[in-house]
């Protein structure tokens, strides 16, 4: 299967999840707006979600996948199964202990870490503590699920792990639809959503567990023991967790700072949902597919293939994210108005703030995606320390910038800090890869990048003038159908203009696409099970 086809397999599941996520956020915005319950739920949910991305997705996609791939290469399926069971025993025990401690400490954690600004608002503070207590066990499900997803990705079975998150949105949409049908108040909706998150974690874990068994590996529970393989994993996982979750660390810091201002937490969350669509579809897909492919190429000594994988991944991410960034910057207000402006959200007049945050996030989008394309170059070589140092610098930049800008700019200042920190991190990662000789100089890529930037600027300028030309059809008073059709037509026209310009200037060509679609990606994986029809 070609690299682009693998990206597409993961991206299709992620796209489904993100599309349903839009539906979920639209319903949530209508039901809760940017009011106190919305702030409480978003702050409470971000806490276990950050831990999930930090210690589960980040650590296991960075540390577990190369080690698991090595076990398959050297000891076959049985060696990989033994390694997985050793890790499962330690991981489950550690997660259980962590969850108990966190549940007992939740009031202190919310007061001093998650949302210190809520401490002076008794009702809001108590609600956040309760919702976070309900949702935190979600971490156990998602961390174990992330481990199994890493196994599936190493076995080149991408779809089950990509589609599992869809069920979080399906369940939460069901909760919101039922609440609307029953006419529930905001607090009841918040409680229902929290229990829905926990139920979704159980469902997602069940999906990947079944998929792993179907792949031919049945994981049993072993008594926790620090074997050499587990110790090696932990040595790699701690810095990898910090590095892989740097965006989430910055978001958690941003939430803590934003809690000092009413509606800021939920405004950031709503903008984040929209820009997560291109970030998830492109960035997450690239990171998930590139790491095992790059690890396999390096383990087999195929340095030319490894360099080609990295260059093609960057080419692919920039080709798709540069126009997305330009569109978010120019069209942020019509997008927010179409997606969210109804019910409690419209009553709170939240559109200008969320649109400003979204536009700034758009400028950081290419950096956030490039980070996911650059870090596998370190992780595949089992170097997790260097990206961790860069992540720490990025956090320092984020905190300093956010604290400086927030008093004057409010929530948009936090978005600026996040974007600046993202670009600092991406440039440091690239610079050291080049200095170490781990990033091959690719002349076609260097020629295409400025042309792709030019194409995105041309598209952005056209969208800017088109938005003003159709201002009435995109305005607050226009019917929903008119706003939707107009916005979709502008996006389609902008995309067409971008592709025409990119091909005309040489930023892209059919030969490039043909090579990426047809080419294989290294040697085939060992035959661990029958071919999965999802592939």
Image: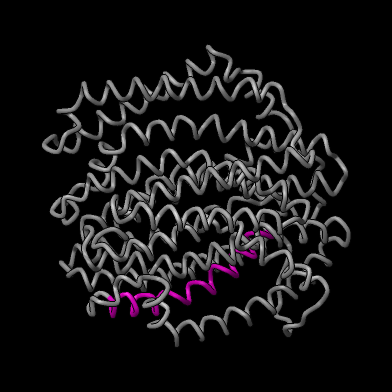
Q: Which color scheme did the rendering employ for the protein?
A: one colour
Q: Residue at x 22, y 78 (%)?
A: 123
The image shows residue 131, relative to residue 9, as above or below, that is below
Q: Position of residue 73 (x, y in %)?
A: 85, 55
Q: Quadrant of residue 62?
A: bottom right
- Tell me where residue 431 appears, x and y as whole percent: 68, 40
For this orientation, the residue located farthest to the top is 504
Closer to us: 10 or 271: 271
| Magenta span main SS | helix
Could you say where residue 467 lies in the image, as x and y percent from the top left?
A: 25, 26
- Quadrant of the rendering where the N terminus is positioned: top right
Is residue 23 in view from this perspective?
A: no
Which residue is most to the left? Answer: 477
- Residue 531: give x, y in percent of width and height: 71, 49
476 in relation to 258, above or below: above
482 displayed left or right of 444: left
The one nearer the camera, 506 or 517, is 506
- Which quarter of the figure has residue 182? bottom left
Total numbered badges shown on the rendered structure: 0
Image position of 365 with respect to 441: above or below = below
Identity of the residue drawn at 34% across and 20% down: 462
The region drawn magenta spans 125-151
- Residue 365 placement, left or right of 374: left
Position of the C terminus by quadrant: top right
Residue 299 in sight = yes
Magenta includes 336? no
For the point 68% across and 21% down, the residue is 444
Q: Residue at x 25, y 61 (%)?
A: 177
Question: Quadrant of the rendered structure where residue 255 is?
Answer: bottom left
Given residues 173 and 54, the one toward you in this image is: 54
Q: Is residue 132 magenta?
A: yes
Left or right side of 228 for 158: left
């Amino acid at each position: 299967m070609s690299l682009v086809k693998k990206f597409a397999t993961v991206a299709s599941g992620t796209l489904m999840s993100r599309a349903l996520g839009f539906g979920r956020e639209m319903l949530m915005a209508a039901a809760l707006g940017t009011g106190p319950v919305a702030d409480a739920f978003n702050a409470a949910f971000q806490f276990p979600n950050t831990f999930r991305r930090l210690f589960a997705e980040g650590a296991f996609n960075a540390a577990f996948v190369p080690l698991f791939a090595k076990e398959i290469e050297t000891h076959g399926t049985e060696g990989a199964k033994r390694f997985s069971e050793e890790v499962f025993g330690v991981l489950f025990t550690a997660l259980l202990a962590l969850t108990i401690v966190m549940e007992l400490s939740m009031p202190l954690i919310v007061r001093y870490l998650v949302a210190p600004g809520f401490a002076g608002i008794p009702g809001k503070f108590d609600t956040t503590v309760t919702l976070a207590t309900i949702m935190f066990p979600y971490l156990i499900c998602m961390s174990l699920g992330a481990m199994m997803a890493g196994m599936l990705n190493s076995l080149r079975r991408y779809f089950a792990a990509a589609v599992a998150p869809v069920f979080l949105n399906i369940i939460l949409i069901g909760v919101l639809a039922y609440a609307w049908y029953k006419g529930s108040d905001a607090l009841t909706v918040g409680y229902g959503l929290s229990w829905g998150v926990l139920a979704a974690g159980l469902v997602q874990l069940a999906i990947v567990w079944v998929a792993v068994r179907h792949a031919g590996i049945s994981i049993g529970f072993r008594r926790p023991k620090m074997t050499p393989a587990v110790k090696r994993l932990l040595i790699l996982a701690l810095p990898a967790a910090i590095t892989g979750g740097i965006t989430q660390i910055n978001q958690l810091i941003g939430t803590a700072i934003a809690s000092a201002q009413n509606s800021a937490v939920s405004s950031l969350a709503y903008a984040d949902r929209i820009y997560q669509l291109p970030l998830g579809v492109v960035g997450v897909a690239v990171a998930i597919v590139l790491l095992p492919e790059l690890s396999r190429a390096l383990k087999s000594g195929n340095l030319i293939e490894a360099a080609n994988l990295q260059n093609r991944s960057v080419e692919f991410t920039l080709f798709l994210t540069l126009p997305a960034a330009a569109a978010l910057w120019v069209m942020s207000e019509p997008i927010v108005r179409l997606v969210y402006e109804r019910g409690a959200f419209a009553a709170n007049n939240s559109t200008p703030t969320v649109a400003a945050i979204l536009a700034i996030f758009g400028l950081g989008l290419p950096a956030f995606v490039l980070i996911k394309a650059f870090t596998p170059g370190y992780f595949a070589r089992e170097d997790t320390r260097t990206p961790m140092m860069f992540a720490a610098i990025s956090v320092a930049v984020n905190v300093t910038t956010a604290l400086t800008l927030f008093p004057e700019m409010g929530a948009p200042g936090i978005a600026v800090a996040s974007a600046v920190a993202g670009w600092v991190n991406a440039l440091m990662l690239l610079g050291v890869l080049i200095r170490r000789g781990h990033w091959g100089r690719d002349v076609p890529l260097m020629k295409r990048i400025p042309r792709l930037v030019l194409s995105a600027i041309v598209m952005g300028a056209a969208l800017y003038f088109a938005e003003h030309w159709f201002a009435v059809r995109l305005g607050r008073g226009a019917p929903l159908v008119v706003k939707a059709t107009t916005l979709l037509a502008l996006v389609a026209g902008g995309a067409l203009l971008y592709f025409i310009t990119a091909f005309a200037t040489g930023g892209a060509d059919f030969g490039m696409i043909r090579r990426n679609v047809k080419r294989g990606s290294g040697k085939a994986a060992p035959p661990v099970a029958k071919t999965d029809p999802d592939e």
